[in-house]
Image (cartoon, helix red, strand yellow):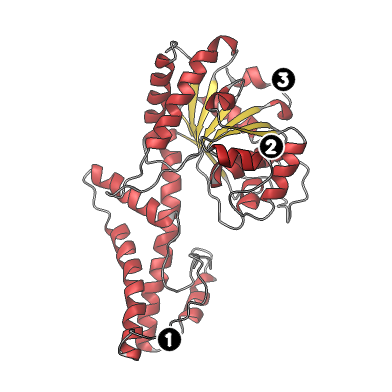
Amino acid sequence: MLAAKFKDKSLEEFKVGVVGAGYVGLVTGACLAHVGHQVVCADRDAQRVAQLSEGQMPIYEPRLEELVADDVRKGRLRFSTELAEAVRGADVVFIAVDTPQGDDGAADLSRVATVAQGVGQALAEQEEKRTRPLVVVNKSTVPVGSGDYVSMLVREGAAEGGNPAVDYRVVSNPEFLREGSAVYDSLFPDRIVLGADERDALDVMRALYEPVIEQSFPTDVDPRPKAAVPFVTTDLVSAEMVKYAANAFLATKISFINEIAGICELVGADVGNVAHGIGLDGRIGSRFLNAGIGWGGSCFPKDVAALRAVAREYDHETTLLDATVAVNDRQLRKVISKLQRDLFTLKGKRVALLGLSFKP
């Protein structure tokens, strides 16, 4: 068993590579280093790597700059432009690159493909120095079924590197970070979801996340939860589906309350009071029941579109998701229609926007 090869390792000895020093990759790398692991973050953007090495953050997240500086000072975190540096000697390598939405709504996996092949090639070139399989973790949001695709690409890259017989495992570990609380969500997550088709890979990931699951690491980030973090293990496809299903459900919940808001306007009801009343039902919950202009941002539109695209590949009708998108699209048009109705024309009018956040 692969896990047995790790049983004598202290938590601080896990060596982790993170490919992609963007939003997800940087937060993931910084937090894994914070809990005691040795992390190398690789990114092809030389300017970004240089800035990160000097402590300059490409994004703002509360506590992130502070964590990165502390991790670098303690020698737990470093940055490189070379993917091979992230693979060399690593126990686990995370793929954390963007998967932008294509014209057809499907996720563009070209960056994931490039990295997966690069990991395979680097692994092949370093295979003689390894004593255990490499665990390759897909942290990027990818379509259902991408785990097998990534595995194939790693194998192809290894063949190009001259050693197609390299030993590795592929794991899906979807992220559930909220902008503005990404560090907190990484250190104190609602749950950790892992999918793999080999038990030993899940055992390794369980050991990697042990300090987070048991909340055994020292930190001044607070408030700290009192209970252990739920740890969900499943197969590759199911883990990939969890991410899309979660975001699709939240988008649907927002569209639902906006639909109710429209009816409330017609009958003279207060949608805020209605949302409060139904939100107290434990089966429903109060979160994501704020009526407004609709959902947006970098995740919901892309993930809902990608899930619908996957369904189309199997000729499956996504009636509910189609309605979710239709209601959301209508919300923006309703705002414009109301302005035109009350002002007759928008030409020459000054419009104030109070709040530009995409969050409901």
Distance, label 1 to label 2, CA atoms, is: 51 Å
Distance, label 2 to label 3, CA atoms, is: 20 Å
Distance, label 1 to label 3, CA atoms, is: 63 Å
Q: Which mark is residue 8?
A: 3
x, y (%) of residue 60?
61, 54
x, y (%) of residue 111?
41, 36
Q: Which mark is residue 33?
A: 2
Does any portion of residue 231 appear in the rendered image? no
Please tell me whether mark 2 sits on a helix, a strand or a loop.
helix
Is residue 284 shown above or below 350?
above
Q: Disc 2 vs disc 3: which is toward the camera?
A: 2
Q: Amino acid at mark 3?
A: Asp
In-image side of 271 versus 149 (left or right): right
Q: Amino acid at mark 2?
A: Ala
- In primary-sequence order, the first of circles 1 and 2 is 2
Q: Amino acid at mark 1?
A: Ala
Q: Residue at x 24, y 52 (%)?
A: 317
Q: Residue at x 46, y 19 (%)?
A: 121
Q: Residue at x 73, y 29 (%)?
A: 12
Q: Are marks 1 and 2 in contact (CB under 8 Å)?
A: no
- In primary-sequence order, the first of circles 2 and 3 is 3
- Tell me if mark 2 has few (under 14), some (14-19) or many (20+) residues whose alpha carbon lies within 10 angstroms of its own: many
Q: Nearer the viewer, residue 153 or 54?
A: 54
Please tell me whether mark 1 sits on a helix, a strand or a loop.
loop
Q: Nearer the viewer, residue 222 or 81?
A: 81
Is residue 121 shown above or below 314?
above
Q: Residue at x 55, y 55 (%)?
A: 178
- Tell me if mark 1 has few (under 14), some (14-19) or many (20+) residues whose alpha carbon lies within 10 angstroms of its own: some
Q: Which residue is mark 1?
A: 269
